[in-house]
Amino acid sequence: MRPALDLANLPDADVVALAQQGRDLAYRELVHRYERPVFSLVYRMVRDRELAEDLTQDTFVKVLSHIDRYRPEFKFSSWLFKIANNVAIDHLRRRSLDTVSMDGSPHAGTIEAVEASSFDVAVPQENALDELEARELGGAIERAIASLRPEYRSCILLRHVEDRSYEEIAVTLDLPLGTVKTYIHRARHELRKALEPLRE
Amino acid sequence: MNHRHLLPNEIDLLVDGEVGFGVAPLLAHVRECDACRLEVEDGRQIASVLEELPRFAPSYGLADRVMAQVPVFVPWHVAARDAVMEWVPASKPFRALALAGGSALAALLTMATLWVITRGELVSMVTVAAGDRVRSAFSIGLREVLASVFGEQVFTAIAQPGIPLLAVAGAGFVVAAALAVLGLRAAAAAGRRRA
């Protein structure tokens, strides 16, 4: 009889090793661990909740179906984000959706559908005014991110939302380190310009 | 005061909070240059706003939806190990007992094998005796079958001249059987043509 494993406390590499041995629970643990980061990245890339759900699912299916190809010298999360980014970028290239509004899905046909697919960036705040300001700033930053080129968007999200180093981003996105630095600098510059009216 | 403004990569170093040997002069410059200080502060503010962005959750049951599409492959060596592990007792005392029993059995089998190997003449004698018994049982069985099919006299007539006649009789039987089969097929084909 096999003893139950406490997967939640294991590092990624060990959970991946268990998945490579065909442990169903290890697959689920990997999905559970990364569903939010991957979904957030994809959602901010494609700006459509339903589509982001599908692409997130595709990402995990691709990664887990080829888990035997994973090489432990790389970080699992970098590999996962690389696939997620490729899936999102491929979709944007196919559909030319790189500058869609964050106020709802472009596929939505009714007001209800627009509302259902719109962003909700509310975070817990102390009072209504704080919440309003946060929503306004959150909405503005989300809009500003949405207006960035997809390449800049991936870099800036991985850098600041996922807290990845420049080197990791370069590996994840298959870009030279210098290019990553340039993209992040330009993204920050464009975000600063986009948010200037709000700060005045 | 150094009048050269900071380069973009130098601004980024400060925005990212790098601390290294080359950062001190940049910080000294920023303390004295309003334009560069403003740029660094703006960069830090943007970074801070981005870092506070929430993470979104997908709808419930993503893992189930993913797992419905992922083929979970169990390598043969893992499957074999699991099959063995199913037989290993869960509690420590029983596991120790099973280990002791298994070890004793393995030792016994090893010793028996070694004993047999070191006694080659005994092995060959046992093998020859077993072979004789099998051969004699086979020939008795064959004799009884032939005697019951063709009768005792025919068997004696075939057996007396020995192997050559037996071989001729066998070949004749095969040829007769083949001719019979061909004849039957020809008759069946003729019947189909008539129909």
Image (cartoon, rainbow, N blue to C red):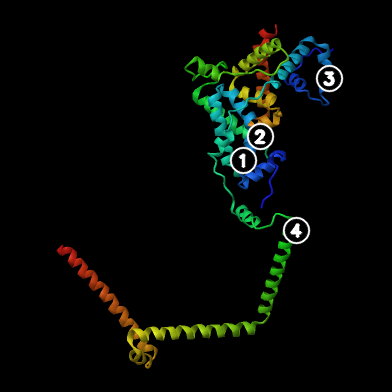
A128 left or right of B125 in image: right
Quadrant housing residue A161? top right
- CA gap between label 3 and label 2 equals 42 Å
Dot 4: element: helix
The residue labelled by disc 4 is B93
Q: Amino acid at mark 2?
A: Arg
The residue labelled by disc 1 is A27
Quadrant (top left/top right/bottom left/bottom right) for the C terminus of chain B = bottom left
Measuring from the top left, give residue A108's x and y in whole percent.
49, 19
Of labels 4 and 1, the one closer to you = 4
In the picture, the disc for residue A33 is 2
- CA gap between label 2 and label 4 equals 38 Å
Measuring from the top left, give residue A185's x and y in whole percent.
68, 20
Which numbered disc flags the more N-terminal residue, 1 or 2? 1
Q: Amino acid at mark 3?
A: Pro
Labelled pair 4, 1 in contact (Cβ < 8 Å) = no
Residues behind callouts 3 and 2 on a single chain: no
